[in-house]
Amino acid sequence: MKIGVISADVAHENRVALTPDAVKKLRKLGFEVVIQSGAGQAAYYSDDSYQAAGANIANSSSDVIADARIITTVNDLPATIVDSLASGQIVIGMLDPYRNTQLDTYAAKGVSAFAMELLPRTLSRAQNMDVLSSQANLAGYKAVVLAANEYSRPFPMFMTSAGTVKPAKVVILGVGVAGLQAIATAKRLGAVVEASDLRPTAREQVESLGGKWLDVPMSEEEAQKAKSTGGYAWTPSEQYMKDQSAVVDKALSGADIVITTAQIPGRQAPRLVHKATLDKMKAGSVLIDMAAGTGGNVEGSVADQTITTDNGVRIVGAANIPSQLAAQSSDLYANNLVNFITTLIAPAATTEATDNASSNKLTLHLDMEDEIQGALAVTHEGQVRLAKR
């Protein structure tokens, strides 16, 4: 059975779905792998490195589609390739399911499509398949590096004979995986870091990394509600939102660097920073909007562009930061895919394939009752399975 990889057909995308190390792992499981020529070049993986790992090189994407049962991808496939898929084929990748306009086509083609973003992140056995976390971790680190490059002053404090240089003040809005990594990275660079999140439980994590929590007064009732839901399903009161806005506005007015990380799958990113706040910020301050590709957390941000406001604030629309760390992000992503693909193998075939990598008896077992497969499958047996949001 063959697994295929095609070149990314998206602007500003340098990642590749499978790396040579991933090919080796899949070969041990009993799969054959076919890679479109040049698919890994932008991530610094040559065709020769894939061949050395045991993959076959195809001249075009159409050759890969015609040859492989499973197609792995970073982003959704181009429409021309989707049209060429055959019934029974499987597509695995970050398919942006809630905004994907091709799901009906996948279903009509009889394709089983798995969107990796839908992984149930609370399952312990699914943690090694969590593409959102693996990519966000790198993105949080790189966002701080981008900010340091844009900022016209150093991050750490310097004591010199010419005077003292104050440390940069960094504010992180959104303390998920990316936000926590951004805090850790900014602290390592010597900045003073503050952070805010709707989840009160994030305070302990922020402080454990040396950051200061931007505290917002909360009623006892709200505190209990937030604690019982972990914050994710918590709907704050209008007063709480106003209070948080005031706290954030004050913090940003004195900030040198602001990094926003808030994104909601299938929806526009929430607006966290408005023009009124931007107008109060210092000339030369920098905002890195990690949600620029989904509408932006910062008013006025544009994906993949840097905008300078009238008062000298630079807004960087960082739409796809993991692509800027293509080699490492591809490696982690490929490991996530390999771990998921392992769940698709029929149990009886797993041991046999491991014992004999050339086994022709490798079979797949698609089980929509499985808590991982069922959650990730957006099309199967001619039906769109994605729940409406």
Image: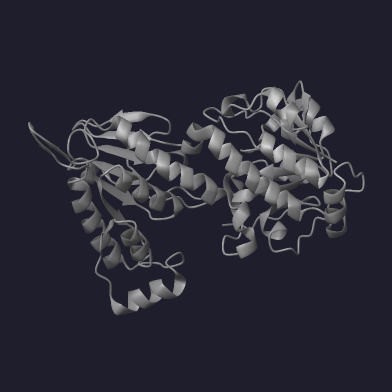
Decide: is 55 above or below 209.
Answer: above
63 to 266, vertically: above or below:
above
Numbered marks: total: 0
On screen, residue 242 above or below 117: below
Image side of residue 30 versus residue 148, left or right: right
Using residue 371 as the reference point, say whether residue 292 is left or right of it: left
Question: Observer-nearest residue: 34 or 164?
Answer: 164
Question: Residue at coordinates 74% horizontally, 28% vertically from top-left?
Answer: 52
Instruction: Say if residue 54 shows up in the picture.
Output: yes
Residue at the location (69% across, 64% down)? Answer: 371
Q: Identify the coloring.
A: one colour
- Quadrant position of residue 77: top right
- Residue found at the far front of this picture: 161
In screen coordinates, is 113 left or right of 141?
right
The residue at the point 28 percent across, 46 percent down is 274
**Residue 293 horizontal/vertical position (percent):** 46, 39
Q: Quadrant of the C terminus?
A: bottom right
Which residue lies most toward the top here? 59
**On the rendered structure, is 379 left or right of 251?**
right
Where does the image place residue 110, in percent across and percent down from the top left? 81, 45
Image location (x, y in percent) of residue 186: 32, 45
Confirm whether residue 100 shows in the render.
no
Q: Position of residue 366 (x, y in %)?
A: 80, 55
Which quarter of the picture shows residue 295? Answer: top left
In the rendered image, the residue lying farthest to the right is: 360
Picture quarter with the N terminus: top right
Q: Residue at the spot x=68%, y=59% of the render?
A: 372
